[in-house]
Image (cartoon, rainbow, N blue to C red):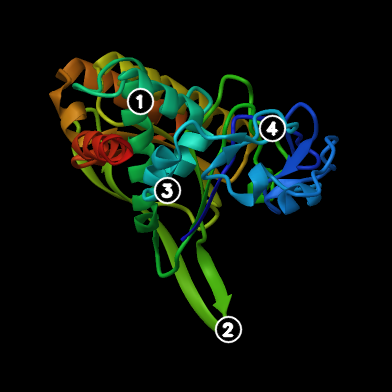
Amino acid sequence: MNCSFLGSKERDNETGLDYFGARYYSSTQGRFAGVDKGEPEPADPQSWNRYRYARNNPLYYVDLDGNKDEPAKSQHINQALAADPRLLEVIKASNNFSQRAFEDALLRGDLGGKLNSGSANILRGLAGEAIVADKLSSFVSGLPASYLTISQPGNLSRFGINVSLPDNIAPDIGAALTSGTVNILGIRVEASVTLKHVVADASGRTGPKGLSPDTKFGLIEVKAGFTGKNILDGAGQVARTAAFLKATGLPGVAILAVDKAAFEKLDAGTRAQIYETVNRAGGYIQLFDGLAEQAAKRSRDAIRASR
């Protein structure tokens, strides 16, 4: 599975470059598109490369504005995060949390307890996104798929579609789905996209859902547990996304990924409301067994390894 994540910097829709303030960054090349305006230091060979990002060592350095490499506050913390590369990618992609924010929260002692408030709650949510990203290979039978995240403001250029998303649509994960007849090394292979454990009606009954071969990507909102209101908010996000896809005729699908136990704990009226909100707009609700518990464990593992 080939994964890449967009950061929280503003992306130019025409060039695909991310604006860092002093210059633009090319995520596909892993380097800046323009030269560093600072003076290279003769005794520091890394400074001779005028296009480098974070001294070509982003686990130990950060470059917040394109002007200056800054050492991480704790190299041990970044080494620990590197042990979970998917979570590290999701943290870097987040609009409301960052690698530096993780460091600061850990050093302040904010990451602990039940992970249900503040920075700890954000980390648990991001861990849930990482778990769903790991599980996305089950979307496609017959072939692996490639996955990307989209951050606000986002566009669909990574899917070969020159369309920007509205400001009120910011999915956690975008999945490029390969389906239909595909030629691999001269062999024709049929690949199909099937969502597992999709809520089928207002009662909460679930089953598999095969998607049209024309479906090229999925835009996914992840809710790893939390409250009924939180899941309702996610349903609203997915409904807006599904309505946008339908109105524009784009070959995508909107999905709400929810912890199974959290969904089942909701009263029947709330479950029906969530289903109707998403289904009416043309989206889907997919339940993930143990998502909240796994997200909490993954968060605590990252915290424990960073100390």
The residue under label 1 is 106
Q: Residues within 10 Å of mark 1 (few under 14, many from 20)?
A: some
Residue at (73% x, 49% y) in the render: 44
Which is nearer the eye, 251 or 39?
Answer: 39
Q: Label 3 sits on what residue type?
A: Ala
Left or right of 177 on screen, residue 247: right
Mark earlier in primary sequence (3, 1) = 3
Classify mark 2: helix, strand or loop.
loop
Q: CA distance from mark 1 to mark 2?
A: 49 Å
Residue under the point 49% across and 31% down:
73
* Element type where label 3 sits in the image: helix
Residue 75 lies in quadrant: top left
Disc number at residue 185? 2
Query: Percent x, y for residue 169?
Result: 55, 25
Residues at badges 4 and 1 in contact (C-beta under 8 Å)? no
Circle on res. 164: 4
Q: Is residue 159 left or right of residue 89?
A: right
Please state which amino acid type lies under the numbered disc 1: Leu
Distance in Å between CA atoms under marks 2 and 3: 34 Å
Q: Which residue is mark 3?
A: 82
Residue 49, disc:
none
Q: CA distance from mark 3 to mark 1?
A: 16 Å
